Structures are given as structure tokens and as C-alpha cells.
Image (cartoon, rainbow, N blue to C red):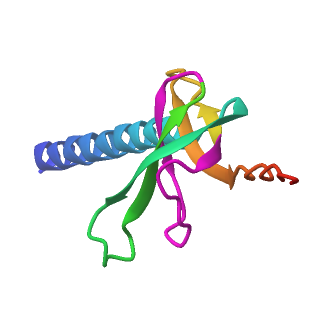
Amino acid sequence: MPKLQSQQGAALLRVALLGVVFLVSFGILYYILTATGQRHEVAGAVIAREIAGASTDRKSRHFIKVRLDDGNIARATIAAELVAEAGRRVKLLAIRMPIFGANRYQFSTFEELPDSPTITP
């Protein structure tokens, strides 16, 4: 009987240890994916719009591909109701992830189009 109780106790200890390892791993992964580091604005022109998931699905995520002024291409999240046609100038919020140093991009605003010059006869 005591041997059976010690086996049950060892199994319970293993399950508890596995649970703690899982929670710590999940916490570290959550921090990596959601922690925000330095933020700065960048500008560029929209190249294309993408939808991840079914377009009828409420949980689908909307993205725009933007050619930044420095020549790089960024993929930024954007709200579904915003219309960002190709060629439109936008500002993105670049968020540097603290652990990997990679940037995530979020749509910030549309750049205002400059007033067209008036031609006087």
C-alpha cells in the first residue's frame, strides 16, 4: 500500500511540474509576442492589401504591404473598414520587439495629399 501511494505521489508531482513548465513557457511566449519596445513612425506607399483567413470570417486579419521610403517592404495590420488603395501614402507605427529586435508594423494614418498647384491663366 505505501508503494502505491508513493507512485501516485510521484505521478502527481510530474503532472504538477509539467504544468509549471507549460505555464512558464506560455508566459515567455506571450511576452515575446506582445511586449512593445521602441516605437517610431515610418512612411511609405501602399503596394497591396491582404486578408488572412476567409474574407467572410469576422476573425480574419487585414494587412497592407507598404514600400517604405527607405526601400524596404513592410506588412502592417489595418482595420477592415479602412480602404487603402495601391499607391496611397500612409504612415505606419514601427514597433521594435525587445528580444529579437525585429519590427512589427501597424497602420497609423493616411498621409494627406498635397494641394494641387493652381494654374493661373
Residue 59: quadrant of the picture? bottom left
Please tell me how many numbered marks the rendered image carries: 0
Q: Nearer the viewer, residue 32 or 24?
A: 32
Residue 35 % position (x, y) = 60, 38
The residue that appears at 57% across and 51% down in the rendered structure is: 88
Residue 99 % position (x, y) = 54, 23
Residue 35 among those drawn in magenta: no
15 left or right, relative to 30? left
The residue that appears at 62% across and 46% down in the rendered structure is: 89
Residue 70: quadrant of the picture? top right
Residue 75 among those drawn in magenta: yes
The boundaries of the magenta stretch are: 70-92
Residue situated furthest right in the rendering: 120
Q: Nearer the viewer, residue 119 or 68?
A: 119
The residue that appears at 42% across and 44% down in the rendered structure is: 23
Residue 101 % position (x, y) = 54, 21
75 left or right, relative to 31? left
Question: In which quadrant will I find the C terminus?
Answer: bottom right
Q: Nearer the viewer, residue 27 or 114?
A: 114
Residue 14 % position (x, y) = 25, 40
Q: Nearer the viewer, residue 58 or 9?
A: 58
The residue that appears at 36% across and 67% down in the rendered structure is: 60
Residue situated furthest front in the rendering: 121
88 left or right, relative to 14? right
What's the magenta bit mostly, secondary-structure-wise?
loop
